[in-house]
Image (cartoon, grey):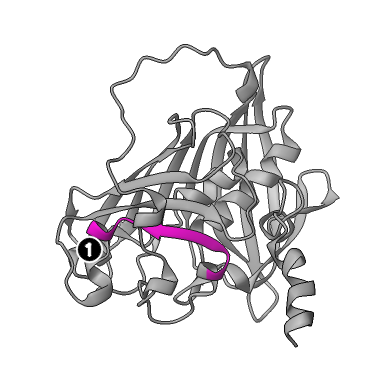
């Protein structure tokens, strides 16, 4: 048995690559006809009782990258209309405008009701371009989040996964949270509405512009640190991809300044291993009732 385990170990530890990973397979779309793509929403990306919004955004982002003349997402705005579930889906895209450096398109993802009719789950409007064509000039007051190194942060094996319902997505992510933002896991939330951590895919696949659309919505919601537990469904999310990320783990900082009327906003900043701000997002979400 020990010898068999030793033989299997190199295969289990083999690092996935961009284009050949579980994320790429599970966000794949198949062209049916011009502007129409078939897809399969994987149960592996569910949290509590719904398919993760960042995973959905990445899938639509892939479809738009194939439909538009430019392949890199620059700005992607999504409205989540109904909760998505694992199973077949169809994505319909439309080219809105094309230019020399930027192109704009829209896409909607549909699933099927029991009577066979289509139900729209998410609608996206996005602008695409070529990240490799951007200038190197940076003028910024933004700095990476202050948090411990990766080895000083906490993952699911350290007992931070106190989330009711499905947590299948946690098996596909390598998240290490800043200990200052995991009070919720031991019944002592900070009340600050902050979440910080190191982020990567569990199979070792390096980040790219498409996976950044997942990253901005992959950490536990800040509502947990506000003392609320349960599903925090996204109403609207806008992500900006600022540059192509360097290989290696990402640092993610998410903050909420205002929970009112049963809704909260989350602002996310994503930094790569080269200390560059590679993605930003803001979303409006419904606060959990717990």
Is 170 above or below relative to 63?
below
Residue at 42% across, 15% down = 138
Q: Quadrant of the N terminus?
A: bottom right
174 is within the stretch colored magenta: yes
Residue at 72% across, 48% down = 17
148 or 3, nearer to the observer: 3
Q: Position of residue 211 (x, y in %)?
A: 59, 47
Question: Magenta stretch?
Answer: 171-180
Residue at mark 1:
225
Which residue ends up furthest to the bottom in the rendered image?
1
Secondary structure beneath dot 1 equals helix
Residue 149 visible in this rendered orientation of the protein = yes
Q: Position of residue 276 (x, y in %)?
A: 44, 29
Residue at 28% across, 50% down = 265
Residue 122 visible in this rendered orientation of the protein = no
198 or 89, nearer to the observer: 198
Is 132 above or below relative to 270?
above
Is 158 above or below relative to 147?
below
Q: Position of residue 242 (x, y in %)?
A: 49, 28
Q: In the figure, residue 111 lies in which quadrant? A: bottom right
209 is within the stretch colored magenta: no
Q: How many marks?
A: 1
275 or 19, nearer to the observer: 275
Q: Quadrant of the C terminus?
A: bottom left
């Amino acid at each position: 048995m020990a010898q068999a385990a030793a033989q299997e170990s190199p295969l289990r530890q083999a690092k996935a690559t961009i284009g050949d990973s579980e994320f790429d397979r599970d966000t794949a779309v198949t062209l049916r006809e011009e502007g129409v793509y078939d897809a399969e929403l994987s149960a592996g990306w569910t949290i509590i009782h719904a398919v993760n919004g960042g995973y959905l955004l990445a899938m639509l982002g892939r479809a738009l990258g194939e439909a538009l003349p430019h392949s890199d997402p620059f700005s992607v705005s999504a409205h989540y209309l109904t909760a998505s579930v694992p199973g077949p889906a169809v994505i319909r895209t439309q080219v809105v405008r094309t230019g020399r450096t930027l192109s704009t398109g829209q896409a909607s993802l549909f699933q099927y009701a029991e009577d066979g009719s289509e139900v729209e789950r998410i609608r996206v409007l996005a602008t695409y371009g070529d990240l490799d064509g951007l200038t190197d000039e940076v003028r910024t007051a933004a700095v990476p989040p202050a948090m411990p190194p990766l080895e000083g942060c906490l993952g699911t094996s350290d007992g931070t996964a106190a989330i009711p319902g499905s947590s299948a997505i946690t098996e596909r992510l390598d998240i290490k949270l800043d200990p200052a933002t995991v009070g919720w896991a031991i019944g002592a939330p900070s009340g600050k509405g902050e979440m910080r951590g190191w982020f990567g895919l569990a199979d070792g696949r390096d980040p790219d512009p498409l996976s950044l659309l997942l990253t901005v919505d992959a950490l536990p919601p800040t509502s947990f640190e506000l003392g609320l537990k349960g599903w925090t469904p996204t109403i609207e999310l806008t992500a900006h991809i600022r540059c192509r990320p360097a290989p290696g783990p990402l640092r993610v900082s998410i903050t909420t300044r205002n929970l009112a009327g049963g809704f909260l906003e989350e602002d996310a900043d994503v930094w790569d291993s080269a200390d560059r701000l590679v993605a930003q997002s803001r979303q409006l979400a419904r606060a959990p009732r717990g």
